[in-house]
Image (cartoon, helix red, strand yellow):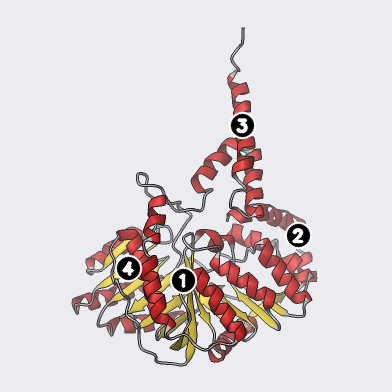
């Protein structure tokens, strides 16, 4: 007579069933590093690991959201087609960048733009408020963090003044990024007559959206003629106690703003099924800069920002400068950075000495020894949390946007990057980056290797879970 297994035996069998099953499931459409991290967790803790994997293990949107995004292809194509009429005559190398970025993000480059790079926090807020106060047609703001503190209240008041003039105002906020202020922010915006929606809310009924898949973009648009893109959220620069942020934002006018507007319109549609503009207006030329918008996220092919960045680092001839607060590269980018140095390219990575996310900081520090040993120069910016995200490759490409150099921005977040494709704009970015280097302490290999052994062990432990951060 067959006896039933005891509870302990059944649990043991179930654990091994989970381990063996997940060996086949986990590696599908994941990087080797991410797969290894998930399998390590599941093999040590099968049941908790399975539950965590079920909650956040699949970086995909539900089917209804994918279908809604696919319905926008005609809209994107129309906007891209009209922007293409403004496409510049590019060099062969810039032309290849434009072509790849267009395939990754659906938008072509455009000439005839004017761009200002603003790296003073208060100046950005003041300029944004002035632009809102001058708005005549509409104001559209998308922000990962939208607070209800004193800084944000200035922006909310300006939106209220615009609404009172008859200017429609629409705001998209991320409920996870803004969780500390969300109730007050929504109440304050609605009280001013602003139409506001939460992005990627967590739904229990109509297909879940993972809470760690966020819309991390920062896009501010006025009348479809002025666009802001960069790293700044609508919140006080010192909203974390003891931490003051330093940001970098591009203020743009010209035809490329149509692509920025199209991203806002599509994000609004994904949340509401309402098309604000069936045909986004193309602003007139008003400058000499050639720019291109590259959106990225789960709806776009490959990992757009990472794909472009890795390819350009691999092709760099003289200099690579990466500015990011969170630096957790995948193996491909790590190899490209090291190989670039071996080819004689000067590679600078500028991170922040001030720490706001301890686990991420420990994980990124685990990469420093290997990078320093191969000649990558690492600079730690003093005094501020350098929250800017800016890349420069030689004098052929600059990138300013919302994307960090980490797996979260590569795979989980909706991001937007502005590509700078003309020499004056790239030179201005170089000037700002040199200021960052001047305000930093360079990390030296001997100094780094003198850190305590316990610190190294903790860093290595954090690195094991870095593909999941």
Between disc 4 and disc 3, whose residue precedes? Answer: 3
State how far apart marks 4 and 1 are (Cα): 24 Å
CB within 8 Å, label 1 to label 2: no
Between disc 3 and disc 2, whose residue precedes? Answer: 3
- Residue under the image location 64 percent in, 72 percent down: 311
* Residue 190 in sight from this viewpoint: yes
**Nearer mark to the viewer, of 4 and 1:** 1
Q: Which mark is residue 106?
A: 1
Answer above or below: position of 56 versus 263.
Answer: above
Look at mark 4 in the image and give the residue it sits on. 171
* Residue 352 in sight from this viewpoint: no
Q: Position of residue 8 (x, y in %)?
A: 61, 22
**Nearer mark to the viewer, of 1 and 2:** 1
- Identify the image quadrant of residue 45: top right
Which image quarter is the N terminus in?
Answer: top right
Between disc 4 and disc 2, whose residue precedes? Answer: 4
State how far apart marks 4 and 2 are (Cα): 47 Å
Look at mark 2 in the image and give the residue it sits on. 452
State how far apart marks 4 and 3 are (Cα): 47 Å
**Nearer mark to the viewer, of 4 and 2:** 4
Answer above or below: position of 312 versus 271.
Answer: below
Between disc 4 and disc 1, whose residue precedes? Answer: 1
Look at mark 3 in the image and give the residue it sits on. 17
């Amino acid at each position: 007579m067959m006896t039933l297994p005891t509870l302990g035996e059944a649990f043991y069998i179930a654990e091994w069933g989970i381990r063996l099953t997940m060996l086949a499931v986990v590696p599908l459409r994941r990087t080797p590093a991410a797969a290894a991290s998930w399998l390590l967790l599941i093999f040590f803790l099968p049941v908790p690991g399975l539950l965590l994997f079920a909650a956040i293990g699949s970086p995909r949107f539900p089917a209804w959201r994918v279908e809604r995004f696919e319905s926008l292809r005609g809209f994107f194509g129309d906007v891209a087609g009209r922007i293409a009429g403004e496409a510049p005559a590019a060099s062969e190398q810039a032309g290849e960048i434009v072509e790849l970025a267009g395939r990754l993000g659906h938008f072509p480059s455009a000439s005839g733009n004017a761009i200002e790079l603003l790296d003073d926090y208060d100046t950005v807020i003041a300029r944004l408020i002035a632009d809102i106060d001058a708005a005549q047609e509409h104001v559209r703001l998308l922000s990962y963090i939208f607070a209800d503190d004193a800084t944000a209240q200035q922006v909310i008041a300006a939106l209220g003044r615009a609404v009172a003039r008859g200017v429609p105002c629409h705001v998209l906020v991320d409920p996870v990024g803004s969780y500390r202020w969300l109730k007050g922010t929504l109440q304050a915006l609605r009280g001013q007559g602003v139409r506001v929606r939460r992005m990627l809310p967590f739904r229990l009924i109509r297909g879940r959206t993972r809470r760690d898949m966020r819309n991390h973009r920062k896009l501010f648009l006025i009348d479809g003629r002025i666009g802001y893109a960069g790293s700044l959220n609508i919140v006080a620069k010192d909203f974390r106690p003891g931490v003051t942020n330093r940001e970098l934002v591009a203020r743009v006018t010209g035809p490329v703003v149509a692509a920025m507007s199209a991203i806002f319109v599509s994000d609004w549609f994904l949340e509401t099924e309402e098309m604000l503009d069936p045909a986004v207006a193309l602003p007139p030329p008003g400058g000499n800069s050639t720019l291109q918008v590259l959106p990225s996220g789960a709806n776009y092919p490959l990992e757009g920002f990472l794909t472009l960045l890795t390819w350009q680092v691999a092709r760099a001839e003289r200099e690579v400068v990466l500015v990011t607060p969170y630096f957790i590269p995948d193996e491909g980018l790590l190899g490209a950075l090291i190989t670039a140095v071996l080819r004689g390219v000067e590679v600078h990575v500028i991170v922040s000495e001030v720490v706001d996310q301890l686990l991420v900081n420990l994980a990124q520090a685990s990469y420093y020894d290997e990078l320093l040993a191969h000649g990558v120069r690492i600079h730690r910016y003093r005094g501020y949390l350098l929250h800017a995200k800016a890349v420069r490759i030689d004098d052929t490409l600059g990138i300013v946007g919302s994307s960090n150099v980490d797996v979260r921005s590569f795979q989980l977040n909706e991001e937007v990057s502005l590509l700078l494709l003309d020499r004056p704009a790239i030179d201005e970015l170089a000037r700002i980056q040199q200021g960052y280097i001047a305000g930093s302490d360079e990390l030296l290999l001997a100094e780094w290797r003198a850190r305590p052994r316990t610190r190294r062990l903790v860093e290595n432990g954090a690195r094991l879970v870095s593909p999941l951060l």
